Image: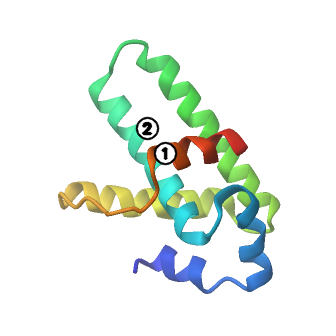
Amino acid sequence: MTKIQEYLAALPEDKKALFVPVFGDMDKFYAVVYLIIRNEHITDQEKPDRYEDRLQVIRQVKSKVEALVSSFGLDGKEIVADIASDYFEDYVNYKEPDFTITGDEFIGTLQKL
């Protein structure tokens, strides 16, 4: 477990309960944010058609997550930044985490934001 994963796991149950309606649980929250960061990075690197529009949408979603987490009384920007740090650490070490979240679950979560 990374430091941010340990931090999230150690949150009081009342704080964890705030994540349930949108994310389900803390592991899914971590996975969703990680995948948002990965999508932002890959889009920025590969520059597919209309990548500027895609990046704008991805960054809006990331901002919504930060604001939502901040509304829970936590530092949303810092938590998202820490998960981004995990992603880039994995990226430079050619690690690919094995998340149990499906593409449909990911999209469904984003729609709840």
The amino acid pointed to by label 1 is Ile
61 relative position to 48: left or right: right
Mark 2 belongs to which amino acid? Glu
Against 49, residue 10 (above or below) is below
37 sits to left or right of 92: right
Q: In this figure, which residue is indicated by the disc labeled 1?
A: 36
Residue at horizontal 62%, vertical 48%?
109
| Residue 69 picture quarter | bottom right
How would you rate the neighbour count of disc 2 (Cα within 10 Å): few for under 14, some for 14-19, many for 20 or more?
some
- In the rendered structure, are the residues bearing label 2 and label 1 in contact, judged by CB atoms less than 8 Å apart? yes
Mark 1 nearby-residue class (10 Å; few <14, some 14–19, many ≥20): many
Res 40 label: 2
* Distance CA(mark 2)–CA(mark 1): 6 Å
Q: Looking at the picture, does residue 43 appear above or below residue 25?
A: above
Question: 72 left or right of 60?
Answer: right
- Residue at 49 percent across and 27 percent down: it is 55
> Looking at the image, which residue is at 46% across and 79% down?
3
Q: Please determine whether, in this image, residue 60 is positioned above or below residue 64.
A: above
Please identify the quadrant where the C terminus is shown.
top right
Q: Residue 81 in the image: x percent, y percent? A: 52, 58
